[in-house]
Amino acid sequence: MDYDTIRNDPMLDYYFQNHSNEAVDYVIRIILTGILTGLSCFTLDIFCNLFLDFKNSITLFFMQSDKFELGVSFFIICSVLYGCISNLLTVFIQPVAIGGGLAQIKAYLNGTNIPKLFIPSCGIIRLFGSSLAIGAGLYIGIEAPAIHVGGCCGAFMAQLPSFEKFFKQKHIENNWFLKFRNDKMKRDIISCGLAAGVSAGFLSPIGGIMFVIEEFQTFWSLQMTISAFICSLFAGFVMSTCLALKEGESEI
């Protein structure tokens, strides 16, 4: 991966002619990354509770009906089924989503190109696979999957591949989707997504910033800190709002 952007006179001339509003576009993508990460982490929480409630409610029904053996059998079979589906999704669809993903993320942000680590399908498999694994009762939580999902949201906002294909099919020239198609900008927006994932997973925006600076970022910059802070704020706000609405609270 290229760690620095190319600096020469033709590139600078093209940059100032076609990227005059990049600061505004960058902030928009950071905010959208935070919002998308908050919604994704809330979806992860919803599916975890859904799988757990289904298994526990059916098991409790059998127990209360004095069918102890049937309840235990259902609990074991459902847990094994959840775990098998989670493994099959990971092994046969997106093997790069194996494990917690933090080691791969560190390697990626420090210059090692890991194919398919932040593509949308990897984030989706991570979301559903982790939900099933948690529903199976395995010893994991939503924090590491939330961080990886946040990174996938950041990579998606940095590239926006589907929208670019749409404009190409309509023969519309639009450079908005190509402005951040370089390794440096992509890493920065992914780092913001990682901070947003920590913020949504722990409901701690400051914790998201500190985690990214401590664990992932090789070089510190004020722009990166401010961007991660903005992204974490929006992710934490969206997650808190969704949880409050889910629980029926009138005050957020």
Image (spheres, rainbow, N blue to C red):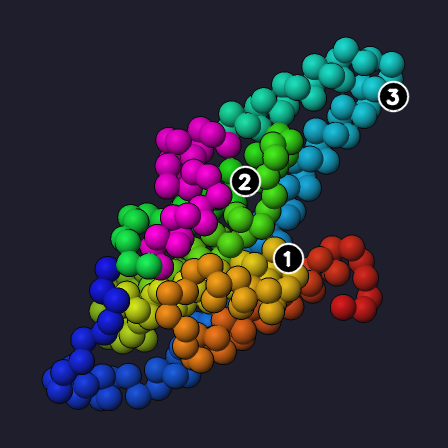
Q: CA distance from mark 2 to mark 1?
A: 16 Å
Q: Image check: 69 left or right of 231?
A: right
State which tag comes first along the sequence, 2 or 3: 3
Chain part drawn in magenta = 86-109
Quick one: 230 or 159, which is closer to the camera?
230
Q: Main secondary structure of the magenta part?
A: helix
State which tag comes first along the sequence, 3 or 1: 3
Query: According to the image, label 2 marks what residue?
Result: 130
- Look at the image and say whether residue 102 sits in the magenta stretch: yes
Residue at 44% x, 46% y: name it. Answer: 101
Query: According to the image, label 3 marks what residue?
Result: 64
Q: CA distance from mark 3 to mark 1?
A: 35 Å
Mark 2 or 1, closer to the camera: 1
Q: Quadrant of residue 208?
A: bottom right
Residue at 22% x, 84% y: name it. Answer: 15
- Look at the image and say whether residue 80 sits in the magenta stretch: no
Residue at 80% x, 19% y: name it. Answer: 62
Q: Position of residue 112 (x, y in %)?
A: 28, 54
